């Protein structure tokens, strides 16, 4: 199935979260603050080796990456977001950390 609509669209006028670099910085700070809670949540849901995971609205991929690390090399972690800049940051972060990057769209 194909579509004429682009996969990544511009945010509608007046959208509360602007996206891009400024929002990526905010998400980075949020990642630091929520790291312990995120790890606890993934543990509580029983995320384990080899799981396939989907992170909808993944932003800069912090939770996507944590899911991929937790589930290990046999895992599939997919992050989707409408902010193309956030996805570019997520890919660079994963590669820069020497990790196998999660699949991001």
Image (tube, rainbow, N blue to C red):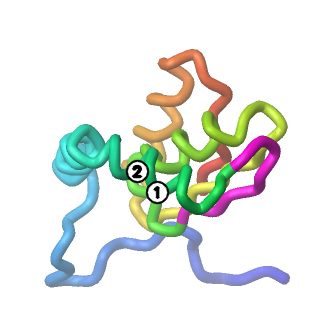
- The residue where tag 2 is placed is 38
- Nearer to me, 61 or 50: 50
Position in image of residue 49 (x %, y %): 77, 42
Q: Which residues are magenta?
A: 48-55
Say whether marks 2 and 1 touch (CB < 8 Å): yes
- Residue visible at 71% across and 83% down in the picture: 3
Q: CA distance from mark 2 to mark 1?
A: 5 Å
**Quadrant placement of the N terminus:** bottom right
Question: From the viewer's perspective, is 6 left or right of 4?
Answer: left
Whether residue 87 is in magenta: the answer is no
Crowding at mark 1 (Cα within 10 Å: few <14, some 14-19, many 20+): few
Residue 21 visible in rendering: no
- Residue visible at 54% across and 40% down in the picture: 65
The answer to whether 81 is drawn above or below residue 70 in the figure is below
The answer to whether 9 is drawn above or below residue 87 in the figure is below
The answer to whether 65 is drawn above or below residue 53 in the figure is above
- Residue visible at 77% across and 52% down in the picture: 51
**Quadrant placement of the C terminus:** bottom right
- Residue visible at 58% across and 16% down in the picture: 98
The answer to whether 65 is drawn above or below residue 77 in the figure is above
Disc count in the image?
2
């Amino acid at each position: 199935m194909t579509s004429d609509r682009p996969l990544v669209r511009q945010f509608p006028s007046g959208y509360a979260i602007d996206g891009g670099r400024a929002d990526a910085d905010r998400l980075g700070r949020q990642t630091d603050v929520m790291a312990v809670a995120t790890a606890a949540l993934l543990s509580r849901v029983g995320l384990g080796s080899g799981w396939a995971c989907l992170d909808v609205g993944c932003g800069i991929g912090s939770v996507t990456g944590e899911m991929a690390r937790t589930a290990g090399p046999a895992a599939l972690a997919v992050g989707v977001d409408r902010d193309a800049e956030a996805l570019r940051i997520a890919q660079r972060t994963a590669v820069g950390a020497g990790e196998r990057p999660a699949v991001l769209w």
